[in-house]
Amino acid sequence: MRFFNSTQKNMNLDDVAKNIMEFIAANPESKYRLAVGTDSQVKGKFTCFATGIHIHRVGAGAWCCIKKKVEDKRYKNLKEKIAYETVITYEIVCLLNEKITDALCETALKYKNFDFKMEAHIDVGVNGETRKLIREMVGYFEGMGVDAKIKPDSFVASCYANRYSKNVS
């Protein structure tokens, strides 16, 4: 898994976790929202999946990165495509959660005003064909205590990742 942003290239998930924790350590008594979301675009016989990770220090900036995966498959079925986007998001949320939970707990014990929430941003909404998939896709995250956001609140999937999913290269 390789992630990148405008200043950093070729990051693995350990690097991403380190950057997130460094971002939090710079101001540990703030409110943070960590969101992961995936979008995809079908181009010819390929489908490009882009997954964004976005850590927001509420009211005071953010750090984010993206991972792209191009599959040699044309996803024609909307449910299959949205389900795969959701599974990718779920996997990244689980892996990231594993890597940062201990450090987050230590930070929470040290700083009484520390506030952190993890969110999964799913590219479905109440308008259009994806409305039929909301309950099922949100269900992936309910049991793990992660807030699932849908459009228009799922900006990591519907805006940030969307920008990168449009280019197959």
Image: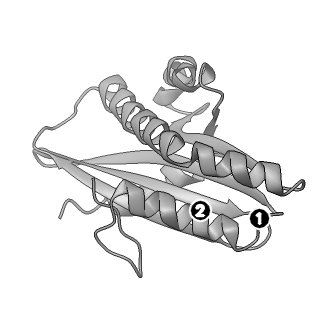
Residues marked 1 and 2 touching at CB (< 8 Å): no
Whichever of callouts 1 and 2 sits on the residue coming sooner in the sequence is 2
- Give the position of the C terminus as an image quadrant: bottom left
**Which of the two residues, 92 or 82, is positioned nearer the viewer here?**
92
Query: Residue at point 77% right, 63% down?
Result: 58
From the viewer's perspective, tell me whether residue 150 is left or right of residue 161.
right
Q: Residues within 10 Å of mark 1 (few under 14, many from 20)?
A: many
Q: Residues within 10 Å of mark 2 (few under 14, many from 20)?
A: some
Query: Residue at point 43% right, 56% down?
Result: 161
Amino acid on which disc 1 is placed: Pro
**Disc sitting over residue 28 in the figure:** 1
Amino acid on which disc 2 is placed: Met
Query: Residue at point 56% right, 19% down?
Result: 139
From the viewer's perspective, tell me whether residue 114 is left or right of residue 133.
right
**Which of the two residues, 67 or 156, is positioned nearer the viewer here?**
67
Query: Residue at point 32% right, 74% down?
Result: 9
Could you tell me residue 126's position as x and y percent? 62, 30
Compared with 125, 105 (above or below) is below
From the viewer's perspective, tell me whether residue 126 is left or right of residue 12.
right
**Which of the two residues, 75 or 25, is positioned nearer the viewer here?**
25
Q: CA distance from mark 1 to mark 2?
A: 9 Å
- The colour style of the image is one colour
Compared with 50, 118 (above or below) is above
Residue 7: image quadrant is bottom left
Could you tell me residue 153's position as x and y percent? 66, 46
Could you tell me residue 74's position as x and y percent? 16, 38
**Label 2 sits on residue:** 21
